[in-house]
Amino acid sequence: MNTIVTVKNKHQAVIPPVLLKHLGIGVGDTLEAKAEGRKIVFTPKQKIDYSQFPNADDEYTPAQRRYIDKRLAKSLAETKAGLTYGPFNTADDMIAHMKAELKKRARAKKIKNSR
């Protein structure tokens, strides 16, 4: 089955309905487009029903989920309160900041242990 298709001003081309019907392709179907030499080849792709796959709800016990949610809520609250560092201009700036913070914590721990 041959038909002529014109590319429009927005680089769009309409595949004639008779061709789609002949191939069993309907609205919402997914097609892969690739160039083969000077031809464009469309290949129908199967839809994936993601509801058939396990999700994170299946991976954690209710107790683990509560713990994760609690930690996420704490992190969000700290972020909203401005308890964050940065932004940093470079990765080296971030690393230098992290090293300085580790030194501060080590000094604080020494002072605490010497009491």
Image: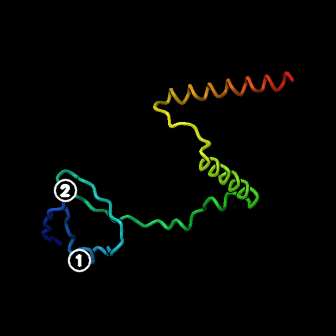
- As drawn, 47 above or below 104: below
Q: Are marks 1 and 2 in contact (CB under 8 Å)?
A: no
Query: Toward the viewer: 105 or 7?
Result: 105
Q: Residue at x 66, y 61 (%)?
A: 58
How far across and how far down the image is residue 49, in percent? Answer: 50, 68
Question: Mark on residue 39?
Answer: 2
Question: Mark on residue 61?
Answer: none
- As drawn, 3 above or below 89: below
Kindly state the secondary structure of the residue where label 1 is placed: helix
Q: Is residue 10 left or right of residue 100?
A: left
How far across and how far down the image is residue 28, in percent? Answer: 36, 72
Q: Residue at x 33, y 75 (%)?
A: 27
Q: Amino acid at mark 1?
A: Pro
Q: Residue at x 68, y 56 (%)?
A: 69
Question: Mark on residue 17?
Answer: 1
Q: Quadrant of the N terminus?
A: bottom left
Query: Toward the viewer: 7 or 32?
Result: 7
Q: Quadrant of residue 107?
A: top right
